Amino acid sequence: MTDQAPVALVTGASRGIGRAIAALLVRQGYAVTGTSRAPQPAEDGIEFLPCDVTDAAQVARLFGVMRERHGHLDVLVNNAALAGGAAFGSEAEAAEWGPIIATNLTGTWACSRAAGALLRDGRGRIVNIASILGLRGVADQLAYSASKHGVIGLTRSLARALGPRGITANAVCPGWVGTRMALDRLQQLGMSPAQAVALTPTGRFSEPEEVASLVGFLASEAAANITGQALSIDGGALA
């Protein structure tokens, strides 16, 4: 059945940036489905479906449910991600490579591929959540940086593959964002929030809602001719 409301799917929507994106799309009138690894009840207008984006069978099941319930998809936001960081050449680096690449890059590809047949010609949008670490390297985050560079390359290729159908694909590249995940990562790096903020010209972290607003714009009709782009929201960190 085709809903009157436009349909959006946001992976990794249970918290942080993903939750802010899903909530914004609800406010914009979308019928929003979010994914999480564990089952979660519907909340704030967001319906949740369990999905591990590294599991091909679960991805196929997710998009099968979307097809059955809605018949089409207007917006796919690939947000599900795994962070990490370890010294080059360490055992920890070797251990985290596979899971991070599988989640951040292969998972984004798998969901985009599955969404292809559902995205509406002339209206479909893919927005991939990358990172400013997809635009520069970091010595102790090889897997994460490589995965996000890959997401940007994938985004540009999707823009070319889907452009003839009137479907856009863009990447959003946040810097430090005020989420639990970011604070945990700072602790792992031995940095305080104040030290991280000092590296940002605007002197503050972005808020999840600010990242969501950029995604909402890219999903809108106003952005119909913006595609293949990697847009930073980083307080000037890459300036």
Image: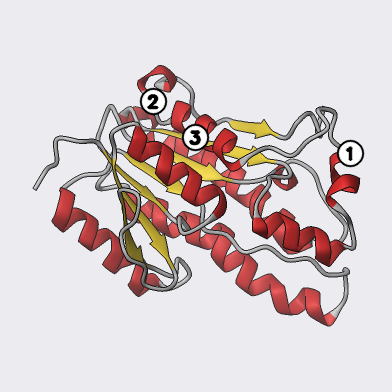
Q: In this view, does 210 lie to the left or right of 193?
A: left
Sort mark 2 into few (<14), some (14-19) or many (20+) by Cα contacts within 10 Å. Answer: some
Marks 1 and 3, how far apart at CA: 24 Å
Res. 215 mark: 3
> Which secondary structure, mark 1?
loop
> Residue at point 43% right, 59% down?
110
Q: What element carries label 2?
A: loop
- Work out how far the residue at label 3 is from the one at label 2, CA to CA, in angstroms: 9 Å
Instruction: Tell me the distance, in whole angstroms, between the alpha carbons under discs 2 and 1.
Output: 32 Å
Please determine whether, in this image, residue 181 is positioned above or below residue 20: below
Identity of the amino acid at label 2? Ser
Judged left or right of residue 83, residue 196 is right
Give the residue type that dot 1 points to: Leu
Q: Are marks 1 and 3 in contact (CB under 8 Å)?
A: no
* Residue at 34% across, 74% down: 57
Label 3 element class: helix
> Which label belongs to residue 160?
none
Of residues 233 and 108, the one drawn nearer to the viewer in this rendering: 233
Q: Position of residue 55 (x, y in %)?
A: 43, 73
- In the rendered image, which residue does mark 2 sit on? 220
From the viewer's perspective, is residue 6 above or below residue 85?
A: above
Foreground: 44 or 31?
A: 44
**Which marked residue is nearer to the observer: mark 2 or mark 1?**
1
Looking at the rendered structure, the kind of residue marked 3 is: Val
Residue at image position (47%, 42%) is 21
Q: Which residue is disc 1 drawn over?
A: 199
Nearest to the observer: residue 150 or residue 170: 170
> Between disc 2 and disc 1, whose residue precedes?
1
Circle 1 residues within 10 Å: few <14, some 14–19, many ≥20: some
Q: In this view, does 199 lie above or below 44?
A: above
